[in-house]
Amino acid sequence: MPVITTIADLKRLHKRRTPKMFYDYAESGSWTEQTFRENTSDFDQIKFRQRIAVDMTNRTTATQMIGQDVAMPVALAPVGLTGMQCADGEIKAARAAEKFGVPFTLSTMSICSIEDVAENTEKPFWFQVYTLKDDEFMQRLFDRARAANCSAIVITLDLQIMGQRHKDLKNGLSAPPKFTVASMANLATKWPWGIEMLQTKRRFFGNIVGHAKGVSDPSSLASWTAEAFDHALDWDRVAQLMKMWGGKVILKGILDADDARKAAELGADAIIVSNHGGRQLDGAMSSIKALPAILEAVGDKVEVHMDSGIRSGQDVLKALAMGAKGTYIGRAFVNGLGAMGEKGVTKALEVIHKELDLTMALCGRRDVKTLDRDILLVPEDFEGRWAR
């Protein structure tokens, strides 16, 4: 086993071990993938101010996200099909997050169900929902999340319709997958993955099959997903869903200051500045570039989090110093899961925590709660008026 010191190391192992269609599902964006690329490259434009002769003892990355104590302000983002990157993937990722002391967010489009994760963990987790038309199904999802003691709901607002993801189409990735000769040949080379998958009963969408009306088996999933998403979504519907849940709500998919203000007015506990990892509107602004204007628009009216493009603890530090109160990793933890299962997710969290802690120290700070823009150097053309 090679020495693993970065998320890139885990990514290489993930690619080697996991079938191409599922690896590409995680490591791709929509259309030309411009936004997918800029989510990471725009982080590279921001530089640190190194400080010396500063007391670096007694450092802490501990803080809170929506009132919940966290070992560092990093949550595991909701990622669909996680249980196809590794057998029982959602359970393994949730366990790793729980032990590390960070939130885990289960996707509606997970392979393991809400109940599966609840039965295999001890602490509350977060649950992500899409804006679906079927009120009866939405209510059942919320009821199941309450029964599982989920402490917050994440409502994804940027997927009324799905962006075109060329790699998924070419790989035949659908619900259920349409296997091609090429994909079957690739699967044959991933026999350790295949053996693990044969040993689990969890191979389909556990929150959908047997729960959504008309979806009794995987063959009926395609027609359901084509009709389920609410194309008529508006802010009144968002308010209705928030009321239906009645607990803590995080609204995900905010890229515009006006939308951020509206989310704050509705009483969201937090918003996530996110472009869905570059998987929806290609050509949209990167999340890190959208963050400053949104922070200016909402002030302290709502807790602002950020995802999309975070691949290191240094990226986390930059987002926090820009003003975010929390961050999310998706591909980074999926790389760990695909590479080494639960141990890989733990390793991903360890890598990010170490990078966050050491970089914070070299910037002259000891407490993650004291981070601000004074530790950054931002180019003049990076949201212009926000440059140092």
Image (spheres, rainbow, N blue to C red):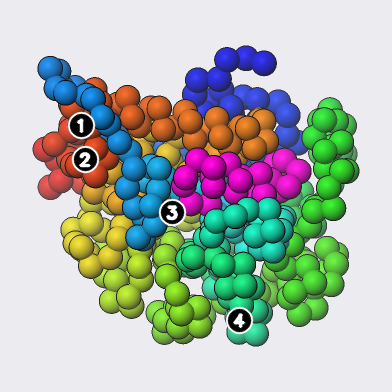
Which SS class for mark 3? Answer: loop
- At 33% across and 38% down in the image, what residue appears? 61
Q: CA distance from mark 4 to mark 1?
A: 45 Å
Q: Position of residue 110 (x, y in %)?
A: 67, 57
Q: Which residue is labeled 1 in the image?
A: 365
Q: CA distance from mark 4 to mark 2?
A: 40 Å
Per the image, label 4 sits on a secondary structure element best described as helix
- In-front residue for pair 371/209: 371
Left-right relation of 305 to 140: left
Give the vertical position of 200 relative to 130 (above or below): above
Q: Quick one: label 3, few (<14), some, or many (20+) residues within 10 Å?
A: many
Question: Quadrant of the image for the C terminus?
Answer: top left
Q: Earlier in the sequence, mark 3 or mark 1?
A: 3
Task: Answer whether labels 2 and 1 touch (C-beta < 8 Å).
Answer: yes
- The reply, left or right, for residue 250 in relation to residue 378 is right
Q: Residue at x 32, y 47 (%)?
A: 63
Q: Amino acid at mark 4?
A: Gln
Hey, what amino acid is under mark 1? Arg
For residue 171, say whether it is visible.
Answer: no
Q: Quadrant of residue 334?
A: top right
Specify which label sits upstream in the sequence, 3 or 4. Answer: 4
Nearer mark to the viewer, of 3 and 4: 4
Badge 2 amino acid: Leu
Which residue position holds label 3? 275
Tell me the tag on residue 371.
Answer: 2
Nearer to us: label 2 or label 3: 2
